[in-house]
Amino acid sequence: MNDDPLSIATTLGDLRPGEFGDVYVQLVDRQERIGKNGLPYRRLEFRDDRRRVFAMIWNDSQWFEACQDEWKLGQHFKVRAIYHESHRGKELVPRKIRPVNEDDLRQGFDPTRCQPRSVEDPAELWDAALMICQCDIQDESLRQLVTTIYTEQREPLLLAPAALYHHHCYQGGLLEHSLSVAQTVIDLIERHRHQLPPLQDRPTCDLAIAGALLHDVGKLLEIDLVQGGVATSLDGQILGHVLMGRDLVRETGQRLRVSPDLLRRLELIVLTHQDYYADGDYRRPISCEALLVQQADRINSELQRFSAALASPGEGPVIPKDNPFRRAILRGEASPDAEANRQT
């Protein structure tokens, strides 16, 4: 180990291929596998805010038992390792590894630097969501309901991703997604209200905007934020964010004495914002406001997934099927003007 020059890089995202350094990482996945020799090994995935890598822990490693029995998903580690890139992906080869301790915290270790983050400041996203609530929802009871949930859940909202795998999978992702869905709903209402009488109904519009801001609020309970937002909570595995979000909206609405009719319609938005459950049991929107939120949700989540796929490494106009959509995606080719601009 002393023969390897230590990199000046201070984060996983800074390491270049072949560099050797000390970095802080978060454990986000662990898989038990059997090698060609019939012996077990562990495939781990670590991340910081800019990079995700895998690491192999072989059965003869000094960390083999600890990584299975003691290390927990979401836990943070200090790793001395070499970083490699190959056809297998981005890999860390550990030389030393240990859980983060109090000394690391005193020396400035920040757990949030091990989580991908929204390009937007989550606190500003929270402020923007509350501004929409205050300016665009006319019904006082709905405005109070959204404000109460966002205020009581502010800290988890600042941290929560919108999902673990599919879209907005980073700190502040839930706020970014919810705000975008609300803005899309407002745009759809403004664009179509003169042609579509249902969008001239004020309660329908208020419910759609409130529902957009609250449709995924169950993610705060489904995703285990205590463990760093990398796994699903027990209740989340059993109930899912749709039912948990509906319960949170219902309980808060009843506490604030929101009209039963308005509350029922708002609950319906939460229950039907996805056009299917994981088991294939379809629940389609049966109200105008629910349809608005469902379509705005789909637009935003799919565009974000597409954007992530387009950022995949590689060259050429077509991205292979190894992406979240499991189909080839057209990246396109730079126009001659764009190419000329890059060269000047």
Image (spheres, rainbow, N blue to C red):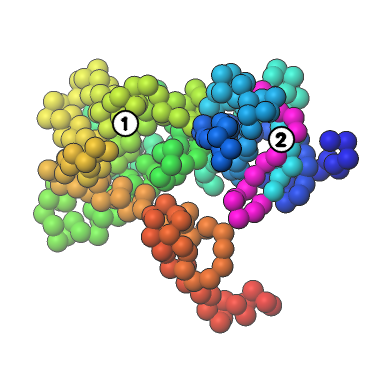
Tell me if I can see residue 273 in this picture: no
Please report whichever mark, 1 or 2, sits nearer to the chain's N-terminal start: 2
The amino acid at mark 1 is His
Residue found at the very far front of the displayed protein: 37
Could you tell me which residue is drawn at 73 percent across and 50 percent down? 16
- On the picture, is 141 further left or further right than 172? left
**Which residues, given as a range, are shown in magenta?**
85-99
For disc 2, the marked residue is 94
Could you tell me which residue is drawn at 36 percent across and 53 percent down? 302
| Cα–Cα gap, marks 1 and 2 | 37 Å
**Looking at the rendering, which quadrant does residue 282 occupy?**
top left
**Looking at the rendering, which quadrant does residue 104 occupy?**
top right
Instruction: Give the SS element for disc 2.
Output: strand
Instruction: Give the SS element for disc 1.
Output: helix
Q: Is the residue 98 above or below the residue 297 in the image?
A: above
Q: Is the residue 19 above or below the residue 320 in the image?
A: above
For the C terminus, the quadrant is: bottom right
Could you tell me which residue is drawn at 46 percent across and 41 percent down? 169
For disc 1, the marked residue is 241
For the N terminus, the quadrant is: top right
The amino acid at mark 2 is Pro
Q: Residues within 10 Å of mark 2 (few under 14, many from 20)?
A: some
